[in-house]
Image: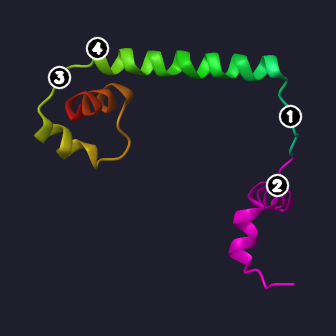
Amino acid sequence: MPVVSPQNHEENNLRKCLIAALTEAGHTLQEIVLETSDIDALRSAKDEVKERNAQDIFNAETIPIEEANNIASKTGLDWQTRCQIQKAKL
């Protein structure tokens, strides 16, 4: 049997390793299996979020690309500012 490095094992079994690590840390986990209809609802919700995000970016105030580059590296930016940066980079 070939030798498998711990990193390869974790990458190939990410879900199992994550569950084990969270359980060892004292977290309570509950496995949820989505029905087909739930998956369709999830896809629909994702599409709605993408549409809302696109609208927010479209409606954001236009700023120069230089300003966008200057503030893009800062942390803790609010949603409006992040939309302005995205709009400037388009």
The residue under label 1 is 32
Q: Secondary structure at mark 2?
A: helix
Q: Residue at x 18, y 46 (%)?
A: 70
Instruction: Report the disc number at residue 62.
Output: 3
Report the residue marked by disc 4.
Answer: 59
**Is residue 72 inside the magenta stretch?**
no
Q: Position of residue 27 (x, y in %)?
A: 83, 51
User: What amino acid type is highlighted by mark number 2?
Assistant: Ile
The residue under the point 80% across, 60% down is 25
Magenta residues span 1-28
Element marked by disc 1: loop
Tell which of 70 and 35 is nearer to you.
Answer: 35
Which badge, 4 or 2, comes first in the chain's sequence? 2
* Vertical position of residue 55 compared to residue 78: above or below: above
Spot occupied by residue 16 in the image (x, y as percentages of width and height): 83, 58
The answer to whether the residues at label 4 and label 1 have Cβ atoms under 8 Å apart is no
Q: Residue 57 versus residue 2: which sits nearer the camera?
A: 2
Mark 1 or mark 2, which is nearer the start of the sequence? Answer: 2
Tell me the quarter of the picture where residue 69 sits. top left
Residue corresponding to mark 2: 19
Q: Disc 2 and disc 3: Cα gap in Å? A: 44 Å
Quarter of the image with the C terminus is top left
* Magenta stretch: includes residue 9: yes
